[in-house]
Amino acid sequence: MAKIPHRFYLTEEQMPTQWYNLRADMKQQPDPLLNPSTLKPVEEQDLYPIFCKKLAHQEVDCTTRYFDIPEEVLDMYKIFRPSPLCRAYNLEKALGTPAKIYYKFEGNNTSGSHKLNSAIAQAYYAKEQGLTSLTTETGAGQWGTALSEACAYFGLPLDIFMVKVSYEQKPFRKAVMQVFDGNVIPSPSTTTQVGKKILQDNPNTSGSLGCAISEAVEKAVNTEGCRYVLGSVLNQVLLHQSIIGLESKKAMEILGEYPDVVIGCAGGGSNLGGLIGAFMQDKILGKSDTRFVAVEPASCPSLTRGRYAYDFCDTGKITPLAKMYTLGSGFIPSANHAGGLRYHGMSPILSKLYHDGYMEAVSYEQTKVFEAAVQFAKCETILPAPESAHAIKGAIDEALKCKESGEAKTILFGLTGTGYFDMKAYSEYLAGNMTDYVPTDEDLEKGFATLPDIK
């Protein structure tokens, strides 16, 4: 058998032309979103003031297994897709493991991440509906950059509420968004009522994705011809990101491989949900016994230490409520460097899978994550984003377990983006100045105290 190449690309003709909706195969559905005013299950039309109509339909559709990818979206996908499936030969050698380590690299576009997969789709549906502008939030900046690219392509103005600590840590990420005409606002801000209230209650807050979501939604619902779009958590986003797993599965089939373990970093859940979808389908249908591992920061441990409950998706409590693993919408994560993972909750789909035992979860302190990132970079020549480095740490640990047991397992992880805008973080790590923060039980109780009383 010929040696598997370091990087394997599907052809454009082999690229999936449909997105996969994992909910259609789940034996137990995630609980429905709740209307924040009535606390009754959300109907599709309830979402129309916030989301594009077709995105609202994708959000609530639990039965359609596959959605056709519009031709205009496919055309833009082909600028940077199919993305490569890579074999980490050098990392395997350095670890001395019998495991085979693969990673799906999503960083080969200007946004430097997987976020463009959903950004293009959401901007397309907004343009198709005749909308005149969009709003969104961004944590580390990958989503804001991706959506700026997509909106520039489709000619839509965009307001981006960027978590304040990331806004301050990553000025060049802001500059890239501005290249694509994105209007970047540090959040919480004084441009919205909810932002003003958050600042009044906590003037020195570093912000959070929950805060930024509140501001973006408020701006959207109060602006004519405007809608809000979200880069993670939602069912529609996991649908668009399913192309990651579909491509991975097809490439591994061609190579004669299938993963024993699939690993992804977990913040809101977009990349993890996208990577595992096609493989999770096999597990749900009894065709495989693959393990799925979500890796999150110890500073924001929604799966490993959170509660499975209905909660608001935003700090301002204006969005629908989702049944998910959450630390409470009032929880403000520490200013760690994995900005894209600083979210208090988790995708309802992934939360349900984890709750029902289809998925595992682990958490790591950021110094251990950066240690893994540096080791990976030296072996594979790609400088990973701090978010992606969580998955790398998980994959290294799994490979070392194989070294101890002698099992030659096949490991697949998601390398969701590059870390070239995270040099301050790398500099702090290399200088020995990086610290770890793990919330105490008392810290977490403050967030849990903000959970709504819904049985």
Image: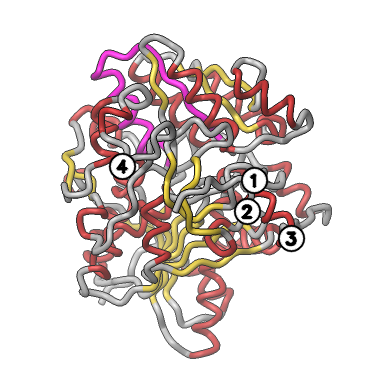
Q: Please state which of the two labelled residues, at mark 1 or mark 4, is closer to the viewer.
A: 1
Q: Residue at x 48, y 58 (%)?
A: 308
Number of labels in the image equals 4
Residue bearing the label numbered 4: 240
Side of 285 where 429 appears, left or right: right
Which residue is under mark 2? 300
Q: Secondary structure at mark 1?
A: loop
The amino acid on which the numbered mark 4 sits, given as a three-letter code, is His
Are the two marked residues, 2 and 1, in contact with CB atoms closer than 8 angstroms?
A: yes
Q: CA distance from mark 1 to mark 4?
A: 28 Å
Q: Position of residue 303 (x, y in %)?
A: 52, 60
Q: Is residue 396 magenta?
A: no
Read off the residue under disc 3: 440
**Mark 3 or mark 4: which comes first in sequence?**
4
Disc 3 secondary structure class: loop
Q: CA distance from mark 2 to mark 1?
A: 9 Å
**In percent of the image, x 53 and y 59: which residue is there?**
307
Q: Quadrant of residue 2?
A: bottom left
Q: Which numbered disc, 2 or 3, marks the residue closer to the eye?
A: 3
Instruction: Locate residue 22, reporting x and y percent.
Output: 26, 54
